[in-house]
Image: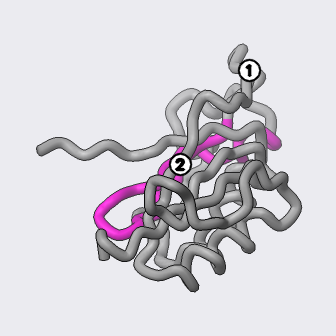
Amino acid sequence: MAKVNSYLNFDGTAEEAFLFYRSVLGGDFAGGIMKMGSAPGAENLSDEMKNRVLHVSLPIGDNLLMGSDIVPEMGQKLQTGNSNYISLHTDSRADADRIFTALAEGGEVEMPMEDQFWGDYFGSLQDKFGIFWMINFNEAYT
């Protein structure tokens, strides 16, 4: 079966965001943090653009959270919106609270962590980088 992984785009804050996500979620980057300056054709980019993230990948369980920065010098424009969420399913209520609290710092809580009518302990938020998250725990699935 194929896997589905989340890929996030940033406007110059991918490295900061992924260092933060690694501090919250744990693990190490697969392959490190690749910069735009290592890509073919990068000699035409400004130094600031060369230092942007070309690709970063953070394993989370059997999944990957991946991302990069856009390159405005190549006509790219970031359009952040609420049409996508990253939904994390934790192993415990305490882990759900820890992750939710850390991701919410400097961001905006949409729904605080609470027991929901469908059976999950659930909350949603937008983090300080504009990324939307859903945090779930359901004892029946652990």
- Asked if residue 118 is positioned above or below residue 76 in the image, the reply reads below
In this rendering, the count of numbered labels is 2
* Mark linked to residue 86: 2
Q: Label 2: state its secondary structure.
A: strand
- 32 sits to left or right of 113: left
- Please give the name of the residue rendered at 70% of the width and 42% of the height, measured from the top-left corner: 50
Extreme right residue here?
106
Q: Which secondary structure lies at badge 1?
A: loop
In the rendered structure, the answer to whether residue 1 lies left or right of residue 99 reads left
The amino acid marked with disc number 2 is Ile
At 58% from the left and 66% from the top, the residue drawn is 115
Task: Sort mark 2 into few (<14), some (14-19) or many (20+) by Cα contacts within 10 Å.
Answer: some
Q: CA distance from mark 2 to mark 1?
A: 21 Å
Q: Are marks 2 and 1 in contact (CB under 8 Å)?
A: no
On the image, the x and y values in percent for residue 6 come to 46, 44
Mark before the other along the chain sequence, 2 or 1: 1
Q: Which mark is residue 77?
A: 1
Query: How many residues crowd around disc 1 within 10 Å: few (fewer than 14), some, or many (20 or more)?
Result: few
Tell which of 71 and 104 is nearer to you. Answer: 104
Is 119 in the magenta? no
Say above or below: 61 vs 124: below
Magenta stretch bounds = 47-69
Query: For the residue marked with disc 1, what is the amino acid?
Result: Lys
